[in-house]
Image: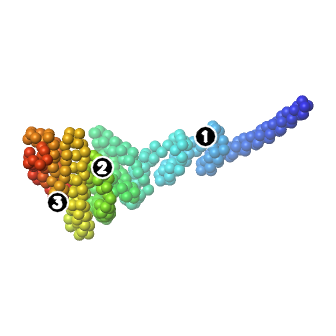
Amino acid sequence: MLDIESKKSSYRMKVNLFFSLILCVFLLSCNSYTNKQFQEAKQCYENKDYEEAIRLLEIINKNSPHYAEAQLLIKQSYRELVNGLMEEYRYDEAIALIDTISPQSCYYGISRLLIPSIRISKIEYMIHNSDVKVLTDNTFGPFDNSVRQLQYMYDTISSDPDLLERKTAYERTLSLAYLLESEYYIEKHRYEEALVLLNNVNPEYIDTEKFTVEMYRREIISTINSINRKKDIEAIKTMTSNICEMNYFDKFHASDYKNDMLKEVGVFKEYWKVITDVKTVYKSDEEIMSLVMKLQNEVIRVQKREFPILRKQYSKILSKNLWIEDIDVYCGGSRNTVISFYGYWYATRENVSDAQNKESSYLNQLRFKKSIYYWCRGFDPTHSYNIDSPDDGDPVL
């Protein structure tokens, strides 16, 4: 028995040794191949073929992420490639190259933080070379940092008497930078931001016979108005559809809190605010005025339906809350506009006055027309109040 176990153990050791030898051979082979690739990449770098060097080094980095020499060489290759593009004034290609680099790569010397300064270099190059195509060049992308740097340089120059001769050049550069940035935001349909940027542009340095900043501004404003009009039309249609839903206010009807009654009134208030604003902005727009009048009629119709329900529910909530004080509350009248309080507490006018003052805000907002206070059933009321509240269909302001 022991002899069999000994043979098994010996066999396992031989198998493990065999696979260890295979693994060593494989690793040596891989290292040899990786070293060969690195030498090829190094040769490409020395021959200034940086793109091929980067291609080979990326493969090495993928297969052997801890190959320190490859990591160092790829950083140098990228840096040399970017610097070469900059020296040849190929700014867009330099920016595009940096954009392709993964943020996780962290290649020193070619961080995305370089992009703003490259864009500044491009702007100044185009200024000095009078490149008129800059007005239609949309290759920049967002460069808030660039504009801020230019603004800082311009402010510095303006405050230093010895540098005033350079002020005009930077002033023109800064105006052009703001113009280019506004064009970028227009491409992204962010017109309000584009308009704000355009306000910083000095027309003196930009205007030509065929292009003026004011023309550009009017186009942006026209586009903003057109977009807002479409949005407002859709919003009005949606609001009209929502308020027509019969169950829209059910959540308020079932509530046991009197403040929830005022929340529904608040909904009507928001509708009337929109109606008033739209009428002011689009008073000469027949299509929108027709839509908003339809919305207004629906709001009035729903208010006339809802306010009597709210008043009835409010009186129930109040009666439930005051039951512990032996006070009953009822709602009556043709449209539930009269609220009546019954209880010994109302035997004195002082208590009646206190109760009326406590509830007056609710009674007004829910559009009650009269409140009556009885100290005992079957007797004349202690006092009653006529409430000067709007009619159910009137605007909620």
Tell me which amino acid carries mark 3. Answer: Ser
Residue at image x 76%, y 42%? 26
Q: Quadrant of the N terminus?
A: top right
Residue 262 visible to an observer of this rendering: no
Precedes in sequence: disc 3 or disc 1: 1
Tell me which amino acid carries mark 1. Answer: Gln
Look at discs 3 and 1 and give the one toward the viewer.
Answer: 3
Q: Secondary structure at mark 3?
A: loop
Left or right: 132, with 296 as reference point: right
Foreground residue, 216 or 152? 216
Judging by the rendered image, the residue that carries numbered circle 3 is: 334
Q: Give the Cα separation between the discs numbered 1 and 2.
A: 68 Å
Q: Quadrant of the C terminus?
A: bottom left
Precedes in sequence: disc 1 or disc 2: 1
Residue 255 numbered mark, or none: 2
Tell me which amino acid carries mark 2. Answer: Ser
Report x, y in % for residue 299.
24, 61
Residue at image x 26%, y 53%? 264
Q: Give the Cα separation between the discs numbered 2 and 3.
A: 23 Å
Q: Residue furthest top?
A: 2
Residue at image x 40%, y 49%? 143
Q: Give the Cα separation between the discs numbered 3 and 1.
A: 87 Å
Q: Are marks 3 and 1 in contact (CB under 8 Å)?
A: no
Judging by the rendered image, the residue that carries numbered circle 1 is: 71
Report x, y in % for residue 259.
25, 46
Foreground residue, 396 or 70? 396
Foreground residue, 9 or 386? 386
Q: Secondary structure at mark 1?
A: helix
